[in-house]
Structure formats: structure tokens, C-alpha cells
Image (cartoon, rainbow, N blue to C red):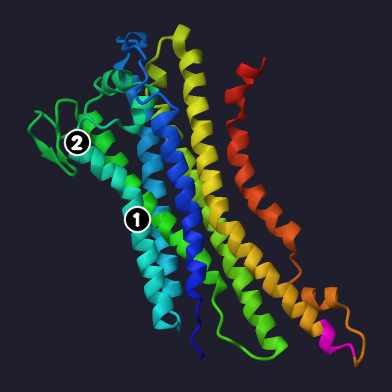
Amino acid sequence: MAKSEVKLRYFAIALLPVCIFAIHELIQHNLIAVELDVPHGILEQDRPWLESVGRFRFLAASWFFAALAVLAVAILVRTLSRPMSGRTRAAAIVTTLAILALAVTPTIQQIASSQDPRIYHQVGKELFESALSQGVLPGCAAADDRWLLGRCGEIPVFSMFRRVLDIINALAGLAVGALIVGMILCLASAHETGAERQAQELSRNLRQMRQQLYLASLILTFGMFFATSWMYWPLPLIAQGDKAAYSALVTASALFTGTYFCLLMLSFYLPVALVLDSRIKRLAEAVNHSGAEGPAIDIDDWRAAHGLKEGTSDILRAGFALAAPILAAFAGGITPLAL
């Protein structure tokens, strides 16, 4: 079997999601309150058991998202195990590790310096600490006790929250790296000759691209489930009179996060999809030209018969159709501002 190869210049597509990440960080640190002063006095103190509502949701979302991250990496490993040129495989691994390193850098900086702001500070640092301090973590009788993820700390549930958040951030970086590289590998070519062989190759590439798109959409959806699970954690403990106001804040924050996730996914899907679309058009034109001297060929029927019917509009529609529901789900967060 011929070894497939991706031209190294196509790995530059990874720079687009890196730019989205950089813009997101720029907005986060310059245009959004680093530490929002949400008073912890809005919490009810007589129903501490309601903290478990948020904890159940957070742990369920963390567990499922971690499983999806592992799935994305496993699919990438399977793809890399296929016959492939050495430099393509090396470029794929290096790109994945570089994206992982970029993604975990903020987390490493936060761990190294306790003064660096955390993501939850933007929806109320004191509120989170106070809400989670009402919970109890089994196995943590004292602050110096150690459990699965390390030292219990003064607020065990809060320590658990921060450590799980760090782990999920690292897994998210690995998953995004795997998704980006997996999408770029859809541009692999074995340099087949003959229209039929090239059409089969492009059809395989399209199927692989759709698989990567659906996986990216699944990870995007449950990434939002994870993000909102921790954002809404203190909500059941908030007094009824302040619950609507805090819910509006969290929903708006989730909308911003969803926008970032959607743009991140589209940034590496659309370039690959458009490159494949241009290859299909070139092949269709070549087939149409080669049949000029023989029997007439219906090029649309030929494309449909070879699984190459999708055009640019179908590609754009597929990408936005999978991303748009994430934003639509949180569009209510801006409605009160528009009234």
C-alpha cells in the first residue's frame, strides 16, 4: 500500500486556531474583569447540602469530557498508525505537542504563581470559595490529609475543583491538538494516478473530514457542558432574590466561551474543507475535459457516483450548522440587554 503524505505547508493551518487562542487570551486579560467582585453574602447559609447539586453536575461533565478527549487522541493514534511518510507523521506529532504546550502554559503559570487570576475569578472568586466551602470531601478530615489528587487544603471541595479544572484543561489542550492534526491529515494524498483512483482517495478524505467534524462538534458541545457545569455550581446556594442576576452573569460568560469554542472549531475545519473542495473541482474539470472527445459526461452524476457531490455551500453549511446551536443555546444571555 502506498504511503500517504501531507505537504508540510498544510500544517500551517494550525496557526489559525493558535490566532483564535491568542485573541481569546487578549480579550480575557484586557477587556474582561480579571476578578469580578461578586459578594459572597448573596449565598444562603442554611442549606449547605445544595452544594452537591453543582458538584454532581461538575464531576459528570468532567468525566464525560475526559472520555471524549481520550477518544480524540485514540482516533489520531489510529490515523498515524496507517501507512504514512515519516515527515508527515513527525510533523503531526510535533504540531499536536506544540498545541498541547500552548494550551497548558496558562495553567502552569497559575500553578507556579498563586497571584495569577483563575478563570473562575471572572464570575466571583469569593463567591466560589464560599459556596464550595460548604461541601465536605470524603477522606479529607484535615487540611494536611492527602487524597487522589493531592493535599486536601483548607477547603477540600475547592481544592478538588481547582485540580480537576487543571486536569481537564490539559486534556482539552490534548484533544484540540488531536482534532486539529486529525483534520489536517484529511489532506493526505498517496499521489494516485488516474481519475478513478483519485476520486476514491478524495472520497476517503471527505469521510475522514466529516468524522473529524462530528467529533469536534461533540467535544465542543460537551466542552460547553463542562464549562457551564462549574460556572453554575454556586447557583443553587444563591438567595432567591439574587439568583436571576447571577444567572444572567453566568449565561453571558457562557456565551463568550461558546463563541470562542465555535470559532476555534471553524478555524481548522473550514481551511481543510475548502482545500478538499478545490481538489474535487480540479478533478471534476479534468474528467469533464477528458470526456470532451468521447460520450458526454454528466459531471454532477459523476461526482455523486463517487461520493464527491458536496460543494462549497454544503461545506460551509455543515460547519456552521454544527457550531451555531452552541451559540443559540446561550443567546438568551443577551436578551435582557436588548430589551
- Tell me how far mark 2 sits from mark 1, CA to CA: 20 Å
Viewer-nearest of discs 2 and 1: 2
Q: Nearer the viewer, residue 153 or 138?
A: 153
Residue 58 in picture, x, y percent from top left? 37, 35
Residue pictured at 47% horizontal, 25% vertical: 250
The disc labelled 1 sits on which kind of residue?
Leu
- Name the residue beneath numbered marker 1: 100
- Horizontal side of residue 10 vs 138, given as left or right: right
Name the quarter where the C terminus is drawn. top right
Q: Nearer the viewer, residue 95 or 64?
A: 95
| Region of the chain picked out in magenta, as a range | 288-292
Residue 109 among magenta residues: no
- Residue 128 vs 316, above or below: the answer is above
Residue pictured at 39% horizontal, 82% vertical: 86
What is the total number of numbered labels drawn onto the structure image? 2
Residue 297 in picture, x, y percent from top left? 88, 83
Q: Is residue 305 visible?
A: no
The disc labelled 2 sits on which kind of residue?
Ser
